[in-house]
Structure formats: structure tokens, C-alpha cells
Image (cartoon, coloured by chain):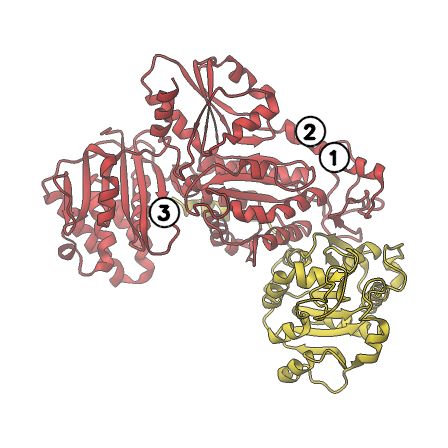
Chain colours: A red, B yellow
Amino acid sequence: MSKQSLNIVIGGAAGQGLATIGRLLSKAVVRAGYHLLVTQKYMSRVRGGHNTFAVRLGTEPLLSGTETIDVLAALNEETLDKHSEELAKNALVVAGDDLDTKDRNALRIPFKELAPKPLFYNIVVLGVLAGAIRLDISILEELLTQTFGKKGDEILQGNLDVLRKAYDWVAEQDHEFGFDGTPKAGKGRMMVNGNEAIALGALAAGCNFVSFYPMTPATSVALSLIGKGAPLGLQYEQVEDEIAAVNMALGASYAGAKALVTTSGGGFALMEEGISLAGVSETPLVCVVVQRPGPATGMATRTEQSDLNLVVYAGHGEFPRAVFAPSDPEECFYLTHRAFDLTETYQTPVFVLSDQYLADSYRDEELFDLDGLPEIAAPLLEWKEDEYKRYALTDDGVSPRLIPGYSEALVRADSHEHDESSRITENAENRTVQNSKRLRKETGLFEEVIGPDYYGEEGADVVLMSWGSTLGACLEACERIDSKKTFGVLHFKQVYPLREEQFMDYLESAGKVIAVEGNATAQFAQLVARETGFFAQDRILRFDGRAMTWEYVLKGLTEIL
Amino acid sequence: MVSTEQFGEFETSWCPGCGNFSIVKCLKQALADMDLAPHDILVSSGIGQAAKLPHYMLCNMFNGLHGRSMPVAQGMKMALPDMPVLCVSGDGCSYGEGGNHFLAALRRNMDLTLLVHDNQIYGLTKGQASPTSSRGHVTKAQPEGSRSDGFNPVATAVAMRASFVARAFSGEQDHLVSVIKEAVNHKGFSLVDILQPCVSFNKVNTYAWYKERTYILEDHDPTDWTAAMTLSEEFGERIPLGVIYREDKPVFGHGERLAEHKYDKNDLKAVLQSYT
């Protein structure tokens, strides 16, 4: 086991409270100054099933989840059965004394002895895990005080007593385990997952409207926005369906809101006509699509990167767009902010494409920099010139956007083809002129494309081409591979449009380019081929519903090379 | 004072004799009577001949997608809460494609007005049955007659205790003007189902057919739900016009104009701190 990082997996059935243990432990780990990376796997049910919450902590920044378990906290027998293969050599098993841990290095918890009633068993597990990895108990005590303080002194004291008892119990046990990594990340860091970071990025951009229909794994974007934004004046509504969500957001945006919709693949499929409407009516809209495996209902709580084509080609007709694909919560924050900037500037839909793995993956992050963010383009509230024309022809295709209700000028938005003054028309010449006007925005969007990041030496023997949340797995695989070859990673956080000159040198100078993607058909490699004519020579694809890990990439590399 | 001329005169794509002409005329009259100028209102519409109305009248408008005028209207209202919002569309758009949105809007009860041009036929697509066509209504697409019961929007809205439910007829213009004004002035969601002949495709529900049957309510108390329920079912030999049901109920809360809403950076910093 590496003493520099530790992978703690808490497994059990939904309803057993493993997410609560996981979140409290994670927060304590971040407060202690470790780096953190959480991977959650859960099933589409409220109770039962097999779920895991994996807390990877380390003294150095962590890149990806890992499949090797150093500490397994088993809340039920099934967890022991399912994960015994993944245990590291000296792994520690933490389980109730009613479970058979075989001859493994184990802490068998006498729950009845340590807690007055089952209600406290979660806290017992938390205390035992904290004791096992020698986490400073005062951090947990403070955390519990903040968490349970509102519920009254009696409940809080009960929890604190149980925590201390469980923590002390570990010290008396004869077990060979300890984590001696010295935390280096520093204090005061945030613990935030991808969806929360998207919500924060939206708030930082001034987003003040969200309409949504609940759909895993996107729901928590809206919930985080509402939880944090509603007290500050954000307007929100859980609507009857995704079609209503996108149309309501467009109505709000037309009337001056900074609007966001959030959904997953199936919901986005329903929104597509509205996306097309945003395109022709030139109404700003940020759309967050958190991917899960399809087609149709697919696997509702698992992860995949298979909706790239859906988003890049969404909507009928032709209109400009931009698509961002963050790789971690920090990028979720800054790219969502940027998405608002672009949609307000170019008045065309902009997408943030995430996935379940990133959505539910907590990380430790520096406080996001609110002061350093650029100002976002704002619409006009006054019109003093001649007749206002919503779709006035301009060189860059962007017409002055006026909000109705502030002047006598009429603001007329239309889904039909229209002339500059929004009059519905089928005139052939006008059609060509207006369609070209809208598409001219592509020039501006193109100039603002964020190019890919390249890691490693240029002209490496092997270059992994990744996008979105798979970056960390690629980087860690390259770090760990035992090979004489040189490796590089070319990572795209904006996946559309693509600007050839930003990356072709990396692809052409590579000995071999391998596309690494969480889908079965290498959708991004195909997009790159369509845009540039460059075909990646090989592929490492994962589409079993699980997150890309460094082990998975490494195995793929070994097979290819 | 606002005059009807301020809303302009436009060439339309409507058939000569279409009921839409008198609806747009009555709408302009109602708005002028209420002293609402073209820039004072927001109009959302869907798709269909009725939904083209805001193209034939000066006003702020968002002419969106088929069936989706209601969600757009509600988004507008949330962003510009002090502006009167009208939603204009046909029976296919409002009750067929947009049926789910219609039901949700009744429940949500935002302060806006839905005007439905109800001609019991799909006119723009040249004469198929609509949700409000009666069972047995023969068209080219329903050669054996419509095999479904007609949707009764008024009864549905009353059953759901919508805030304001009225029926009008495009051939009774003074009455239509007064009902629109009452609907716009009502605080909460207002439905005005406007009967309107489709002179090209609906050979059943003609001017004569409506004239023979419709009558203007005189002694009805719209706050009497049981009486309203009974009246809402009256659609055959006699068809009542007027405010069928009215109830004061909680209106979907509205805050400030969102174009002016900005966060205090210190509040956002506190939000970030809550994640440490």
C-alpha cells in the first residue's frame, strides 16, 4: 500500500447511510489538509442494492479514482463478497462483528457495545475509520457539532460520545494498520463535487433562474443552485417536464434572466426542440447535461461519455453553439461561468457536458476566485435610437439584445424565419441573409475557443487524447506505466467548436495517438476526424457504466503497446 | 390614453371570415381600454394560425414552439413579474401538444392570461380533428368521425379549481372585450376559451351553429363551484358564455425583475465558505 495515498471504500445498501459516513469522512479529510477524490457508485433505488462511496485521500494531488482498496468498510455481507478481489495486500477490513471477515486484517466492530442504538452505527463506523487512519478526532468533533448542533444538545452529545468511544476502541485493538502521510494541502479548502461546482459557477456568473425536471445524475446541480441561490434571490421552478424546463428558461431569458437548465441525456433529448428555438430566437441559455449510460433509460445512476454527439448535433436546423467538458470541479466552476459569458455575448445556446462520475466526485479545491472572474456581457435595458430591430444585421452576427419592459421599443423574438424586425417571412433572400447572420457568430465563438491542455513532452511516443472527466485516469496511468516509451496526454475541456491550429501539431508529432473515452464508439475521436481529417490510431474505451480509472487505462495501454 | 391604432394594422395569412380577425380586434380594444400600450405587455404564443396573432399586432412577443407558449409565458412572468403577460394560441397548441403544460399552469397559478382560439379543428394543417373536436366529427384524417371524446377545457379548469375560467365567442365582440379585460385584471391564472369558427375546414361548428347555441350568462355566481361545474358541462344545445368560475387563491410568488437582480459578492463568498 502506498503511504502517500489511501483508498477507503465504504460499501453497503442504499438507506444504510454510507453516503453520510462518506461525506463526513471526506470533509474531515479535507479539513485535516489531505487531498481528496471521491468516487460514488450507486443503484437506481431508494433502499437496498449495492452502493459504494470511495474516499481516496493523499498527500499529493490525486488525479483519478483507483480500483485497489486499502480500507474496506463493509456495512453488509455483500460488500465483503463483492470487493475481496480488489483488496490491497495489507488492506484493512472494517465490519460489524456479526460479519465473517475470514482471516483478513480486520477490525470487527462490536456495534452493540459501542453504541446505545442502531441510529448511531454510522457514527461508530466513522469513528473507527478515523481511528484506523489516525485522523485528528477534534476535526470530527467540530464537524459533528456543525452537523448535529441544530438538532439539540442531547442528540449532539450522543453522537460525540459514540464517536469518541469508537475512536478510542480502535486504539485498543491489535491491528496492523496506519497511515503516516503528512497532510500538505493546507487548511481552509473547499470540499465540492462536480455538480456543486457547476452550480457555484452559475451563481458566480449571475445565474438567477433555473427550471428543471429531476433526473439523475443532474438533479443536484439544480438542488445546489436552489439551496444556495434561492436565499439570494434566484428564481426557480421544478416543472412538469424537460420540454417545459427549456421553454420556461427561454421565456425567462428573453425577459432578462440569466437562465440555466439542467438535465441528463434522456431529458436533453426532450429539450432538443427548445435548444433549436434558442438558436433561431437568439436567446441566451446555458444547458448542463450530466451524462449517464443510454440509450433511453440505460443505467440511470452510472456513468458514461456517450452523449457528446447528442449535444454537439442537438436541435434541427443550423445554428452556432459551444460545448464545454470539464475534467474536475474546478473546471466545472470556471467553464460554467464561461458558458454564461459566451451565451450572453453570442445569444446562442452553450453547453456544459459533465457525467455522473464527475457529478458525484468530491474533491478538495482552493476557494474559487470570485474576484478574478471576467465581467459577463449584459443585455441592454435602454433603447434611444430609431426603431429597435431584434435581429438587426451586424458584421459579427450579434444583434443588440434589449430586454422588454424598460423602454417603448418592442422586443420581438421568433421561432419562424424572420426579418430584422422579427416579421415572419419566407422571402428567399431574407432567409439566406438571416441564416448567414446567425452563423456568423461562429467566427467569434471560434476565436474564443479554449484549446486543449497538453501534458508531457511534445512528440511523445504515445499521446492519449482525452476529454471531460477522463483526464485524471489518463495522467495517472502515464505516471505509473513501466515502459521505455514516452507518454503525453492531450486533453480537451472544450469539445466544440474545435480549432485545428491549437492542437494539430501535438497529434501529428505523436508516435501514436490513442483516444481514451467513456463510450463504445470513440465519439470525440470521430469528431476530431470530421473536423481535421486526423484519425487516432487506437482507442481505449470504457462503456460498462463505471468511471475510467488509471488501472483501466493502464490495462488498455499494455494491450495496445 | 392608448388607442387601438397604436397596435397597428397588418396583412395576415388568415382566411377571409376567420374568427381570428375579431379576436385580435377585441384584444386590441381590451388593452386600449385598460390603457396598456404595446410596450406595456408581454405576449407568448405557440404555433398555428391563432399563434400568429402577435405578428399581426404590435406588442412585445415571444412566438415560440407548438404547444409551448405556456412555459415561455411563465418564464417571462418570473423574470418580469410586474408586466402583464398574455399567452395566445389555438386549441391544438394549448390542449393537445401543450396539454401537460396547461394542467401544470392551472396548478401553478401564476398571474397571467391564456387566450385560446378554440375552433375545434386543426386549421393550419388543413382540417384534422383537434382535442376539442366532438366525437364523430368527420375530417379527411378521421373519415369515420373522431374516435375520441372532445376535451372540455372549461370543465377541466373548473374541476381543478383554476383561478379564473371563462368562455367567450368571437361573434360576441363586446362581451369578448369585457371578458378579456376581466381576465387580465384578475390576479392569478386566467383561462379564456374563445369559440371561433374555422370557415375553411370546420363545417360543423359554424357561425350559425354557435349563434344558435351560445348565450351570455346573467345571474351566475362564478364563486359557486358546484354551479360552475354544472355550467361547464353545458356544451351542446346551449353553450354558456361568460365567467364560469373564479377563485382567489395563492398566486405563484414573484420577486424582483431578474434583469436587475445581482448577487452581492460577499454573499457569494459566504456561499463558497460554506463548502470548507
Q: Chain of mark 3?
A: A
- Residue at 64% x, 48% y is A274
Can the viewer see residue A456 in this picture? no
The label number, if any, that marks residue A42 in the structure image: 3
> Which circle's residue, 2 or 3, is located before the other in the chain?
3
Cα distance between the residues tagged 2 and 1? 9 Å
Amino acid under disc 1: Gly
Whole-angstrom CA distance, mark 2 to mark 3, is 43 Å
Q: Which residue is at 25% across, 63% downward?
A: A154
| Circle 1 SS class | loop
Which residue is disc 1 drawn over?
A: A397
Which residue ends up furthest to the bottom in the rendered image? B219
Please give left or right for residue A353 compared with residue A179 in the image: right
* Local crowd size for mark 1, using a 10 Å CA cut-off: few (<14), some (14–19), many (≥20): many
Q: CA distance from mark 1 to mark 3?
A: 46 Å
Dot 3 alpha-carbon crowd within 10 angstroms: few under 14, some 14 to 19, many 20 or more: some
Q: For the residue marked with disc 2, what is the amino acid?
A: Thr
